[in-house]
């Protein structure tokens, strides 16, 4: 390979790396603003998918005051309302909402998997 071609190849790699580095936006803790029925449904679906399809019940104001969402495991009960398993040993699942560039992204803390919430509007958490 000629010196010119090696120089062009090296320059291309450098430029590509620089573009990727510049386009990477840091994640900033965020909260949902202006929640809608569509954004609440999208959040519920995202959490359910992260939990392998488990049904979830979320409050209408989930992630509107804090960027952390904690999902407690369900506690199966018998007909009289007593827990079937006794003591619950499973840990709660945690999700974090972040603003990544212009996108609202839900991160499952246990797996690190990220899901963009397209129907959701969020803003960075105000620092105090």
Image: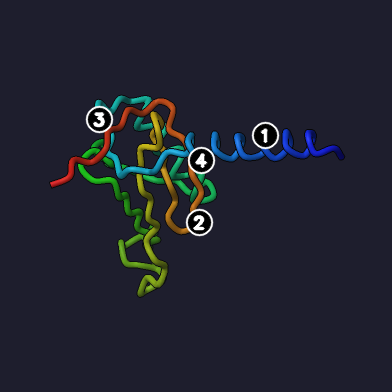
CA separation in Å, label 3 and label 4: 29 Å
Q: Which residue is mark 4?
A: 21
Q: Foreground mark, 4 or 1?
A: 1
The quarter holding residue 70 reads: bottom left
Q: Foreground mark, 2 or 4?
A: 4
The quarter holding residue 123 reads: top left
Q: Secondary structure at mark 2?
A: loop
Residue closer to the observer: 102 or 113: 102
Q: Which residue is mark 3?
A: 33
Badge 4: residue crowd in 10 Å (few <14, some 14–19, many ≥20)? few
Q: Secondary structure at mark 1?
A: helix
Q: Secondary structure at mark 4?
A: helix
CA separation in Å, label 3 and label 2: 26 Å
Residue 124 screen position, x and y as percent: 27, 37
| Numbered badge on residue 12 | 1
Q: What scheme was used to colour the molecule?
A: rainbow
- Which mark is first along the chain, 4 or 3? 4
Instruction: For the residues labelled 3 and 2, say whether their Cβ atoms are less than 8 Å apart.
Output: no
- Which mark is first along the chain, 4 or 2? 4
Instruction: For the residues labelled 2 and 1, say whether their Cβ atoms are less than 8 Å apart.
Output: no
Instruction: Decide: is 103 above or below 73.
Output: above
- Which mark is first along the chain, 1 or 2? 1
CA separation in Å, label 2 and label 4: 24 Å
Instruction: For the residues labelled 2 and 4, say whether their Cβ atoms are less than 8 Å apart.
Output: no
Residue at 54% x, 34% y is: 19
CA separation in Å, label 2 and label 1: 34 Å
Instruction: For the residues labelled 3 and 4, say whether their Cβ atoms are less than 8 Å apart.
Output: no
Residue at 73% x, 37% y is: 7
Badge 3: residue crowd in 10 Å (few <14, some 14–19, many ≥20)? some
- Which mark is first along the chain, 2 or 3? 3
| Numbered badge on residue 111 | 2
């Amino acid at each position: 390979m000629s010196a010119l071609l090696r120089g062009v190849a090296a320059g291309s790699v450098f430029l590509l790396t620089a573009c990727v580095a510049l386009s990477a936006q840091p994640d900033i803790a965020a909260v949902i603003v202006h929640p809608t029925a569509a954004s609440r449904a999208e959040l519920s679906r995202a959490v359910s998918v992260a939990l392998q399809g488990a049904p979830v019940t979320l409050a209408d104001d989930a992630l509107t005051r804090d960027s952390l969402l904690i999902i407690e495991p369900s506690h199966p009960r018998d007909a009289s309302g007593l827990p079937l398993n006794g003591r619950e040993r499973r840990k709660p699942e945690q999700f974090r909402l972040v603003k990544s560039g212009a996108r609202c992204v839900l991160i499952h803390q246990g797996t690190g998997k990220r899901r963009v919430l397209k129907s959701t509007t969020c803003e960075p958490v105000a620092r105090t």
